């Protein structure tokens, strides 16, 4: 058939190295950039098929997030700005791994199985991060898209959440916002400024916020957005990409895993700092106290701050909307206890990976989800949004109308499509300002249990299988019993192991009453895995 001829012809320019196999994992494909050209071309093809199938605009983001600069990756964005639906991940994997002579069959299979009408319209939007390899790889995506004679728009350098936002806007007739980067800045800055203007706290006692941009796209985008936030937020940007290497000794993942400040940032005692990751879909906060001790405020602390704030507003508007918090096994035990016992908010545990948390959070009127690593957002159901918007005008008291207005601003400020470092940062900054809360006071809401994350290189990580949202292993036999015995030796202890979805390693997490014990426990569990 005509369209496949063109596809096969162009494929010669993006030939797959024979024998190479990759998997569409937790965050799409991710590996060394030089192995990805054929994958990009084929993801361009797949995006066109997905677009025809859903009769919507589909996104393709070229990024490897917090991975080293030499890596790259790609993920597809579904119509409402969510991650690609799981059933299609199999197609992605099959398509990426088909040898050149199998490509035609792989494509025909998808077209047949999904009964795709190749005459249907399609449109793909493309974005990329700042990696040196990203531009060429995104051109390979475009080659795939045009081989199918599809429409497309290349948005160039954008953060991952900006592309998710754009996809959602394009498929909702602009009701979510203008489908441009400028539209994103407009929407968020308006909501932020409206929110912070209601703060009773004077400008004078506000310190500026220091941002570690991980030498990535987030730094670039913060520079563009900065002017929209004046004078309500003053920012100091470090690791802006002018000298350092992407994600090298900086960024949210580095700070969270090593529990220390990034290089290249100037920290003064008591001053708020935050780190983005390489594609700006994660954020963690931290500060150093007067004794120069480092304090981390990770995704769990962020989830607690945001859900507490929303809950207080819900009481004021007197709406009976249910709210739930979704975490993963990595959530610090203290955060879960605080949310359940003090805040009386139901907490759920999902498997690692945004799609799992996102899915669970959709079950609530208001679903707050955060991974401890700093990826998260808040989802508002249609019902919740409608009720809140209505109360802005019809609330029975001044106080309830004001609270409804704040909730409405939060809805506009949060990027509901996916975790977003910039959007989350603005939500946090607004809450701190409205509550007159210093970073130390926020940190004091609960005290983290000391914890440690380690990774173990094994011959084959797939020998480990987990259950119960990755909190227990069912394979290999005997491993869980071993871990249980080890955990029993420590106080206030918990540990689990899980195969990584993005690297060829097994991850180990442990928490206990002291840092020494958390370290020792993690170490012992590593030996049990090895
Ligand atoms: C990916 C996920 C992140 C998860 C991490 C776990 C997305 C967009 N990102 O970065 O949510 O925490 O993988 O990696 O889903 P791991 O399986 O290697 O521990
Ligand atoms: Zn990321």
Image (spheres, rainbow, N blue to C red):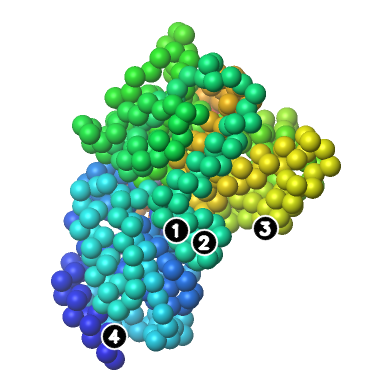
Residue at the farthest right position: 396
Q: Which of 110 and 349 is in front in this view?
A: 110
Q: Nearer the viewer, residue 522 or 165?
A: 165
Give the Cα distance between marks 1 and 3.
21 Å
- The residue that mark 2 highlights is 174
- The residue that mark 3 highlights is 382
Give whichever of discs 3 and 2 has the lower sequence position.
2
| Mark 3 secondary-structure assignment | helix
**Residue 179 percent location from the top left of the image:** 44, 58
Characterize the local packing of mark 3: few (<14), some (14-19) or many (20 or more) Cα atoms within 10 angstroms. few
**Residue 452 percent location from the top left of the image:** 45, 30
| Mark 4 secondary-structure assignment | helix
**Residue 369 percent location from the top left of the image:** 58, 45
User: Does residue 514 appear in this view?
Assistant: no
Q: At x 33% / y 23%, what residue is drawn?
A: 265
Q: At x 52% / y 24%, what residue is drawn?
A: 450
Answer yes or no: disc 1 within 8 Å of ligand 1: no
Q: In this view, does 393 lie above or below 92?
A: above
* Label pair 1/2, CB-CB below 8 angstroms: yes
| Mark 2 secondary-structure assignment | loop
- The residue that mark 4 highlights is 3
Give whichever of discs 1 and 2 has the lower sequence position.
2
Residue 179's label in the rendered image is 1
Give whichever of discs 4 and 3 has the lower sequence position.
4
Characterize the local packing of mark 4: few (<14), some (14-19) or many (20 or more) Cα atoms within 10 angstroms. few
Q: At x 47% / y 71%, what residue is drawn?
A: 56
Q: In this view, does 486 lie above or below 513?
A: below
Characterize the local packing of mark 1: few (<14), some (14-19) or many (20 or more) Cα atoms within 10 angstroms. many
* Label pair 3/2, CB-CB below 8 angstroms: no
Q: Tell me the quadrant of the picture where the N terminus can be found.
A: bottom left
Q: In this view, does 266 lie above or below 326?
A: above
């Amino acid at each position: 058939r005509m369209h496949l001829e063109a596809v096969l012809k162009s494929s010669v320019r993006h030939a797959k190295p024979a024998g190479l196999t990759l998997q569409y994992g937790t965050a799409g494909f991710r590996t060394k950039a030089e192995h990805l050209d054929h994958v990009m071309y084929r993801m361009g093809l797949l995006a066109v098929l997905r677009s025809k199938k859903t009769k919507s605009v589909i996104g393709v983001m070229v990024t490897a997030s917090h991975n080293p600069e030499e890596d790259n990756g790609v993920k597809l964005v579904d119509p409402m700005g969510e991650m690609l639906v799981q059933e299609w991940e199999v197609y992605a994997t099959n398509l990426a791994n088909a040898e050149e002579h199998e490509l035609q069959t792989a494509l025909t299979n998808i077209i047949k199985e999904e009964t795709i009408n190749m005459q249907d319209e399609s449109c793909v939007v493309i974005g990329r991060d700042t990696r040196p390899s990203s531009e060429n790889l995104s051109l390979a995506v475009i080659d795939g898209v045009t081989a199918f004679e599809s429409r497309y728009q290349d948005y160039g350098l954008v953060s991952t959440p900006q592309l998710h936002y754009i996809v959602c806007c394009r498929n909702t007739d602009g009701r979510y916002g203008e489908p441009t980067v400028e539209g994103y800045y407009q929407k968020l800055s308006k909501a932020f400024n409206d929110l912070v203007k209601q703060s009773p706290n004077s400008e004078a006692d506000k310190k500026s916020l220091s941002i570690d941009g991980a030498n990535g796209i987030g730094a670039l985008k913060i520079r563009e957005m900065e002017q929209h936030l004046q004078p309500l937020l003053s920012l100091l940007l470090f690791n802006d990409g002018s000298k350092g290497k992407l994600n090298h000794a900086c960024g949210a993942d580095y700070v969270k895993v090593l529990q220390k400040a990034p290089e290249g940032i100037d920290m003064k005692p008591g001053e708020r700092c935050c780190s983005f990751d390489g594609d700006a879909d994660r954020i963690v906060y931290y500060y150093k106290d007067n004794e120069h001790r480092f304090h981390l405020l990770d995704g769990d602390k962020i989830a607690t701050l945001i859900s507490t704030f929303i809950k207080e507003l819900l009481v004021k508007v007197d709406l009976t909307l249910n709210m739930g918090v979704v975490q993963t096994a990595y959530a610090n035990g203290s955060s879960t206890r605080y949310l359940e016992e003090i805040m009386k908010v139901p907490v759920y545990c999902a498997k690692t990976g945004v799609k799992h948390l996102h899915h669970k959070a959709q079950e609530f009127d208001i679903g707050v989800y955060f991974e401890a690593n700093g990826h998260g957002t808040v989802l508002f159901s249609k019902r919740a949004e409608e009720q809140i918007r209505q109360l802005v005008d019809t609330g029975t008291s001044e106080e309830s109308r004001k609270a409804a207005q704040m909730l409405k601003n939060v809805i506009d400020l949060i990027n509901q499509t996916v975790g977003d470092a910039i959007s989350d940062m603005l939500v946090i900054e607004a809450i701190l300002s409205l509550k007159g809360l210093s970073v130390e006071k926020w940190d004091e809401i609960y005290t983290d249990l000391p914890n440690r994350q380690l990774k173990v290189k094994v011959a084959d990580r797939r020998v480990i299988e987990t259950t119960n949202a990755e909190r227990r292993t069912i394979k290999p036999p005997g491993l869980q019993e071993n871990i249980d015995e080890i955990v029993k030796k420590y106080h206030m202890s918990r540990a689990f192991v899980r195969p990584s979805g993005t690297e060829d390693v097994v991850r180990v997490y442990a928490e206990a009453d002291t840092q020494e014990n958390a370290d020792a426990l993690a170490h012992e569990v590593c030996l049990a895995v090895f």
